[in-house]
Amino acid sequence: MSSDNAFKVIVVGGGPVGLTAAHSLSQAKLDFVVLERRAKIVEDAGSNLVLLPIGLRVLGQLGMLPTIESVSSPMSRFRRIDHDGRDLGDTLWFTHFKEKPVYTLTILMSMLTATSSHGAYPRVISRHDLMQTLHDGLPAEAQAKLLPGKKVIDATSGPEGVVVTCADGTSYTGTVLVGADGAHSRVRDLMRAAALQAPTTTEDKVNEAEPFLTTYRAMWVRFPTVPPIKAGDASETHGKNCTLQLFAGEDTSVIGVYERMEKPTREGVRYNQEDEDKFIERWGHLPIIEGGLTIKDAYVNRTQAGMVNLEEGVVKSWSWDRIVLVGDAAHKFTPSTGAGCNNGIVDVVALANELYHAFKDIRASDQDAFPTREQVLAAFDGYQLARFDTVKAGLAGASQATGAATWADATHKFVDRHILSKQSLQKFFSNRNAPALARTPVFEYVTGEEQMVGKFPWVYPIKPQSS
């Protein structure tokens, strides 16, 4: 987009979405800085993530797919059992089209899948390994712009740009501010406060103070991968008020246990050891996989564990003035479909493409010009318009999947026990929704090789290197 530094982007949040933004800006040759509140950019903490084809394709365009494949495990099926260990039937969303290349999307789970003649499955990866890959994939000069220990306390946006202030007394000036700082986004709070103070702000640009609703809480546990669990296993345990997902890696496995709360809430909470002990008392007896291993067994042998609320929702307005939100700061799903991180990656793509068009338009008449404030705001609006309906559908799919797995009511229980296990219906829903998946964008200005070629061609192809 530019070889100059007059246009600078400040990214708050150095997680997977924030580092994807760093890649997009580095590729565009735009100046940027990433401010991360944690002491390290890459930490050995957090649960596992599922990279779906929409996310893998973007990472492949950025040249990181071989590394991703070397530190992740392919996922081909979910085994499903109930609270008593009885078989509920496998879901084979990832294997129906093993013999003929196809891209697919499940209607209830929004679990985006892709298989080819060589087997392009979704992949399970630890947050640490994904972060390490994203970090190491940046050139040295871009890595130097990733700044840990930067807790943002204030941000202002004006006609000339944005100023971000950190708790350590440092401040940073830029053209735009991208909030990639998660569900409890400080940038979103500051954006709302600024919108409320502006006399010309309309109601549709002011978000709720607490935009997400919590219906479930979760415990995640990392533990050594031991028999009967083997690398690549993916299993779910379903039943009244509680479900769990297992993702097994080569050395460690992770379970996420999701418990329906007595009453939904918008209030945040920090859980402690006493909360974990009570959680294990309630649900420790549940089987993780056929063979007798229980939640309590995993917890006793844990290497890491934690509890969090599972917020859900889509923020009404994703931008105000020169501030824009991406990923969990703008929308939050339950983890049941693995769609959260992947949609954050695609957010970055959509936002980067809108800014690319703003640069392209202004430089049609002046090769040294930068987008005006009005063009930047129009790009932000275009980004939200491009993504809003897709993430609303993703929210609904994740909510339906978690509701079905926790048997929220008689209908969900019936669907979970008698519908989702039918492979003919899985195949039907997969084919029916393939065109929607095929419309997922990639960076318009980044050249690369199309590594996922299937029955349903992508609407937006990767720009070939010869272009």
Image (cartoon, rainbow, N blue to C red):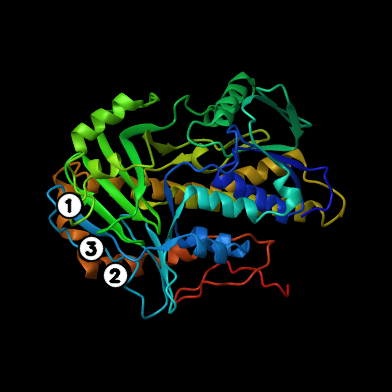
Count of marks overlaid on the render: 3
Q: Could one spot residue 80 in this view of the protein?
A: yes
Q: Which circle's residue, 1 or 2, is located before the other in the chain?
A: 1
Q: Is residue 437 above or below residue 222?
A: below
Read off the residue under disc 1: 292
From the viewer's perspective, is 57 left or right of 21?
Answer: left
Q: Is residue 209 above or below residue 391?
A: above
3D distance between C-alphas at marks 2 and 3: 13 Å
- Point out residue 22 in the picture as x, y percentages from the top left corner: 66, 48
- Point out residue 69 in the picture as x, y percentages from the top left corner: 50, 64
Which amino acid, by three-letter code, is at mark 2?
A: Lys
Q: Which circle's residue, 3 or 1, is located before the other in the chain?
A: 3
Secondary structure beneath disc 2?
A: helix
Q: Residue at x 48, y 24 (%)?
A: 209
Q: Is residue 103 above or below residue 326?
A: below
From the viewer's perspective, is 267 left or right of 134?
Answer: left
Q: Quadrant of residue 378?
A: top right
Q: Quadrant of residue 50?
A: bottom left
Read off the residue under disc 3: 90
Q: Quadrant of the C terminus?
A: bottom right
**Label 3 Cα crowd, 10 Å radius (few <14 / some 14-19 / many 20+):** some
Q: Nearer the viewer, residue 284 or 360?
A: 284
Tag in front: 3 or 1: 1
Q: Could one spot residue 350 in this view of the protein?
A: no
Tag in front: 2 or 3: 3
Which amino acid, by three-letter code, is at mark 3?
A: Asp
Which amino acid, by three-letter code, is at mark 1?
A: Gly
- Point out residue 264 in the picture as x, y percentages from the top left corner: 29, 29
